[in-house]
Image: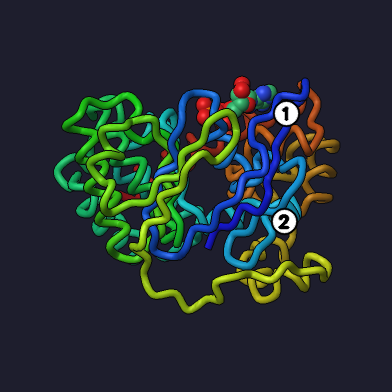
Amino acid sequence: MVRFDTVTKKYDGNIVALEDVNFDIKQGEFCFITGPSGAGKSTIVKLLIQDELPTSGSIFYEDIEVPKIPHKMLPSYRQKLGVVFQDMKLLNTRTLTENIAFALEILQKKEQEIKNTTDYLLELVGLEDRRNLYPDQLSGGEQQRGAIARALASNPSLLLADEPTGNLDEENAYMILDILKKINDSGTTIMVITHDNILVKAEKNNAREIHLDEGKVVSDTKSSKTKEVNKPEKIEEKKEPINEAMGDQIEDIQPKEEKSKMETELTKLSKGLVEKFEKNAIYSTDLLLGLTQGDLKNLKLKKKEVKELRKYIKNYLSNKSNDIKKKS
Ligand code: ADP
């Protein structure tokens, strides 16, 4: 499902974050990526969501060669992954239910499906009775469980969690671990980046541990716990152009909006921004919301444009929030 093949990542200033990293994670695995601070753990996540590009080597997610995904397809690709960061905050202006429902709205789900999925996810993370609370009314552990529920909204086949128990006490950390195990039991592959040795030790018989130090894999327990996979074990390196190499996947991750015209709302932005978005096939605000800082850098937005965009997104979110409130 995830394959790093001799991956090296050097940041500006010749800082080597990863060096010749190889691993292959199969569908259904539960895998910890461990190592001291600065070992290169977060870089693995950044490469997997194409927030950064490798200096050399190849990275595959299923049979998609991640560094080759065109920018315009990144938001849709990222919807295939559920990502939870330690500092990933829920939107403060919305209740827990609204936070999850919003993620589903972006995916253009119908009202009934939004309701059913939200109920299911709240139950999965044990927060049904907290559904109408705002994030600042929730404890740290509850917020993190809420963030996991939101990350699962797109029904991803891989859940990537970067230090999900970072700021939590032991009891809450175990609760998160139990939820991740439950999610894994239903077939979702899990990659947890952590320096929490207690959790890793507690799971040493059930989970795999890839340990990094100074950018290198120093040990890999290669757990035997893998679920049935229908996909070929080894993904042959594809030499065709990206469109062919991605095969059916491209249809799958092609944003629907791409075939339609740019949202009228978006055309109210300044001419330079509209042109940059059109060039990158970003036709809707929902696609904008999936962009990362790295994407913004690639889009070469001017400072003034970034400011304009921030204001636009703030307005958009506050209007949407009002819409949701009206509906409920
Ligand atoms: P970890 O998650 O294990 O703490 P990281 O992947 O964040 O490690 O970082 C690995 C190394 O790369 C560190 O030395 C860090 O300082 C460096 N690094 C990370 N991001 C950048 C960046 N954007 N620019 C320069 N160096 C970076």
Q: Quadrant of residue 113?
A: bottom left
Name the secondary structure under disc 2.
Answer: loop
Q: Name the residue tied to disc 1.
A: 11
Q: Is residue 239 left or right of residue 212?
A: right
Q: CA distance from mark 1 to mark 2?
A: 20 Å
Q: Is residue 67 visible?
A: yes
Q: Is residue 216 left or right of residue 196?
A: right
Give, as a three-letter code, the residue at label 2: Ile
Q: Is residue 145 left or right of residue 268?
A: left
Q: Is residue 257 left or right of residue 108?
A: right
Residue drawn at 40 percent across, 44 percent down: 32
Using the image as rendered, state which of residue 160 and residue 259 is in the foreground.
160
Tell me: residue 322, above or below residue 229.
Answer: above
Mark 2 neighbour density, 10 Å: few (under 14) some (14–19) many (20 or more): some
Q: Is mark 1 within 8 Å of ligand 1?
A: yes
Using the image as rendered, state which of residue 265 and residue 227 is in the foreground.
227
Residue drawn at 49 percent across, 58 percent down: 25
Name the secondary structure under disc 1.
Answer: strand
Tell me: residue 194, above or below residue 114.
Answer: above
Q: Is residue 283 visible?
A: no
Using the image as rendered, state which of residue 261 and residue 79 is in the foreground.
79
Q: Position of residue 303 (x, y in %)?
A: 76, 21
Give, as a three-letter code, the residue at label 1: Tyr
Q: Name the residue tied to disc 2.
A: 69
Residue drawn at 28 percent across, 62 percent down: 185
Q: Ligand 1 quadrant?
A: top right
